[in-house]
Image (cartoon, rainbow, N blue to C red):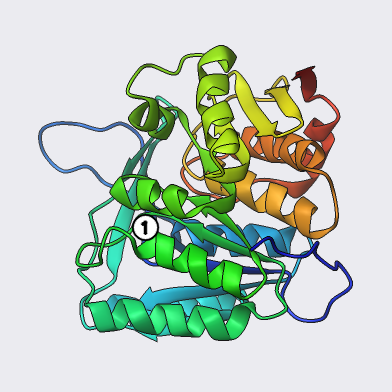
Amino acid sequence: MTAAPPDPSAAGPAVVTLTMNPAIDLCWEVDHLEDTGKNRARVRSVAVGGGGINVARHVVRFAGRATAVHTAGGEVGLRLNRLLDQEGIDHVAVGIDDETREALVLFETGSRRSYHIVPPGPRLQDREGERCLEVLERLVGGCPYVVASGSLPGGLREDYFAAVARRVKEAGSRLILDTSGPALRAALAEGVFLFRCNRTEAESLTGRPVSGFDDARVLNERLVTTGAAEIAVTTLGELGALCSTREGHTELYVPPLPGEALSDAGAGDSMVAALTTQLAAGEDPVSACALGVATAAAAMLTPGTEPFDVDVARSLRSQVRTATRA
């Protein structure tokens, strides 16, 4: 079932996001990492992370409306909820028995390098996964876009995101998917509105290197023609991204950065948030992806998972070059 076009003037959230495996990101900085003795660190920030939560946060920063659905368990889960409340993010927590994970972002000021260290996270029970689906189903009625982003935690069946895709379609909404692994393949077999992947995920789907636009086109063409995705977006790092629909393929090139690239952590979530916000506002896929590419570039100017500058992202939008191929 194809969802009806979104109504940008509709009340309620324009975007509902799903994060099955969130984390609290502890960002520390050190002058220089030493392999002996103690490394004295300074706490740079403490923030909630996870694909869908990040997307919801950035949708709001672009003046959109979003609600984040996420799991939360143990003491870390309680802290996660408090941090989201303090940040003012509209969210619905689904309690789980196991402990929510913590991740570490280490920024070395001397080398200006960031290291993102992420544990696998909790194992969920089937009943916990089902509760998330029930909460999502209650929220998506009348919401034009749902974003399922981030990893699938252990314990859930591999076709979990396929079940998400089915329920979203049945509700008349459009699913934007950004995940990886076996759960990704099952969801694509079900079919989604938009799929975003990076080079690593693209290579896992094609079984061969994806180094440029031609390689990405082979994958995107397959996804679109088989009905796995109405829109396929493959990001190519420093090159940019390829946005594909049944009308054709558009290459979008990364704009010149106005500063030093410090970290690519969070660039993908930032891109998804920007393009989803634009789609919810009624923009066409290529225009939406152009802001997405600009926003990912802006995100690289900040260390660790710190938020990008919205004004910088918007200023870079006009510098994203495009080339359309039939």
Q: Residue at x 34, y 31 (%)?
A: 204
Q: Secondary structure at mark 1?
A: strand
Q: Nearer the viewer, residue 168 or 69?
A: 168
Q: Residues within 10 Å of mark 1 (few under 14, many from 20)?
A: many
Above or below residue 291? Residue 20 is below
- Horizontal and vertical percent position of residue 208: 35, 18
Residue 23 visible to the viewer: no
Question: How many circles with numbers are drawn on the protein?
Answer: 1
**The quadrant where residue 160 appears:** bottom left
Which corner quadrant holds the C terminus?
A: top right
Expressed as whole percent of the image width and height from the top left, the position of residue 31 reads 35, 35
Depth check, front residue: 41 or 317 = 317
Residue at screen point 86% across, 29% down: 318
Q: Residue at point 60% right, 18% down?
A: 239
21 on left or right of 10: left
Q: Which residue position holds label 1?
A: 26
Residue 42: image location, x then y, percent: 37, 51
- The residue lying at 45 percent from left, 48 percent from top is 188
Q: Quadrant of residue 234?
A: top right
290 sits left or right of 172 in the view: right
Q: Is residue 166 above or below residue 76?
A: above
Residue 227 shows in this picture: yes
